[in-house]
Image: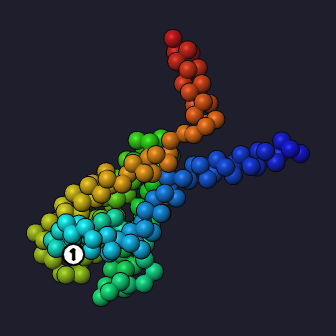
Amino acid sequence: MSLARNSVRNSARNGVRDNLPAIVTLLIVAGFGLFGVSLVTRVGYLAVPAALGLPYGPPGLRLVPLGETTWLMTLTESAAALVLVAVVALARGGFQRAWGAFVTGTVLAFLLRAVVLAQTVSAGLGAYAAYLAGAVVMGLVWGIVFGWLPGLAALPRGKARSEGAAEVIDNAAESA
């Protein structure tokens, strides 16, 4: 009986551990949804991308429009945040894979936001290309800046770390 209970407990613990990078990413996008505007207000140079027509930071998960933001932009922002979380949730692996997934998800989220923004303002071909290029650059910047947080969450801990080290040693011994 205790063996079955322990296996259920370990599988639940491993499920949370495997999804920890996605949980951290969800906390990041929820934090930007709640505190992103006050952050830009306090740190003025973060408003430079917004002055150029680009989003100022990672997508924020919001339930209602903020200020004079339209419902379309609010839904786009929330969809971009969920895309970012989904990309990180689908990545399995260590630090570099989680960080890379966060960077990729951030670029995809910025591209989604840029496409909707360019369609909203009826941008021409040159402006559309500039929106996309700016989205890629800003997505890379913000992905690199915050990607280490889900990366740290993906690192093995405790017993899993020692089991992983033992597996690496066994594999090295077999190949030698």
- Locate residue 87, reporting x and y percent: 44, 57
Q: Quadrant of residue 88?
A: bottom left
Measured along the vertical axis of the image, is residue 4 above or below residue 165? Answer: below
The outermost residue toward the left is: 126
Observer able to see residue 82: yes
Q: Identity of the amino acid at label 1? A: Ala
- Locate residue 147, reporting x and y percent: 38, 51
Residue at image position (69%, 52%) is: 12
Is label 1 in a helix, a strand or a loop? helix
Measured along the vertical axis of the image, is residue 147 above or below residue 34? Answer: above
Residue at the disc numbered 1: 118
Q: Is residue 12 left or right of residue 165?
A: right
- Locate residue 119, reporting x and y percent: 23, 78
Q: Is residue 18 left or right of residue 34?
A: right
Measured along the vertical axis of the image, is residue 106 above or below residue 50? Answer: above
Residue at image position (37%, 57%) is: 105
Front residue of 146/43: it is: 43
Front residue of 70/151: it is: 151
Residue at image position (15%, 71%) is: 52
Residue at image position (54%, 53%) is: 20
Observer able to see residue 93: no
The outermost residue toward the top is: 176
The outermost residue toward the front is: 42
Label 1 environment density (alpha carbons within 10 Å; few <14, some 14–19, many ≥20) = many
Front residue of 67/18: it is: 67
- Locate residue 96, reporting x and y percent: 40, 41
Q: How many marks?
A: 1
